[in-house]
Amino acid sequence: MRFLCIGILVTAAWAGTSINPDAAVTQKFVKSVSEYQSLRKDLESKLPRLKATGSPYTIAEHQQALAQAIRAARADFKQGDIFTPAVCAEFKRLASLAKQGGNAWRIEKSLADAEPVKFRVKVNEIYPPGVPQQSMPPSLLLNLPPLPQDIQYRLLGSTLLLIDTRANLVVDMAPDVIP
């Protein structure tokens, strides 16, 4: 049976059968995030190492230097380079699926209870310090691709943000993704 399954997969690949287009879009998103993470790690390795400290000033200084290095390396990046139109459409579909069925009321309640965060934000800019961070409902997070450590989804109204928490930087944003 095992050989039969493998044979069917190989035959399907040879026959030119394509993979699930939704999975391909998600896979491209994951690859883009991974490439960003690799860039950040490379840039951070060139900065003076942050030693264990309780000094908020030292931590903020390191964070600002990292953000500046990332902004310089991504000077040509713009909104939609990671959250491409195809990724936005797929995430909107996934968010809509999460809001159906038994978990719909939880998501609606979580979004309604959250303090709405509204301000102007741009890709490659610092997430403003002191501005509240609207959390993502867990049921919604479960429908989105998992992110590597130090990169998070955040909400800004109906806009989905991709935030690098090590640099406190807006990596990309997807307007009107969360219905």
Image (cartoon, grey):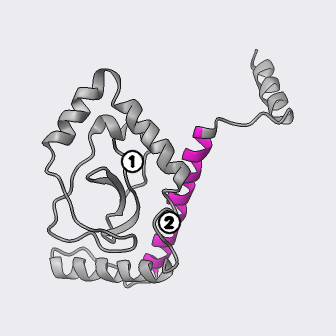
Q: Tell me the number on the disc at residue 177.
A: 1
Asked whether residue 55 appears in the rendered view, the answer is: no
Q: Quadrant of residue 141?
A: top left
Magenta segment includes 30: yes
Q: Give the range drawn in magenta.
A: 22-45
Q: Quadrant of residue 128?
A: bottom left
Q: Quadrant of the N terminus?
A: top right
- The one nearer the camera, 78 or 70, is 78
Q: In this view, does 82 lie above or below 44?
A: above
Quick one: SS at disc 1?
loop
Answer few, some or many: residues within 10 Å of disc 2's Cα (few below 14, many 20 plus, some between 14 and 19). Answer: some
Residue at 18 percent of width and 34 percent of height = 109
Type of the residue with mark 2: Tyr
Q: In this view, does 119 lie above or below 98?
A: below
What percent of the width, then of the height, locates residue 93?
A: 46, 37
Answer few, some or many: residues within 10 Å of disc 1's Cα (few below 14, many 20 plus, some between 14 and 19). Answer: many
Q: Mark 2 points at which residue?
A: 36
Magenta segment includes 118: no
Residue at 36 percent of width and 67 percent of height = 170
- Mark 1 and mark 2 residues within 8 Å of each other at the beta carbon: no
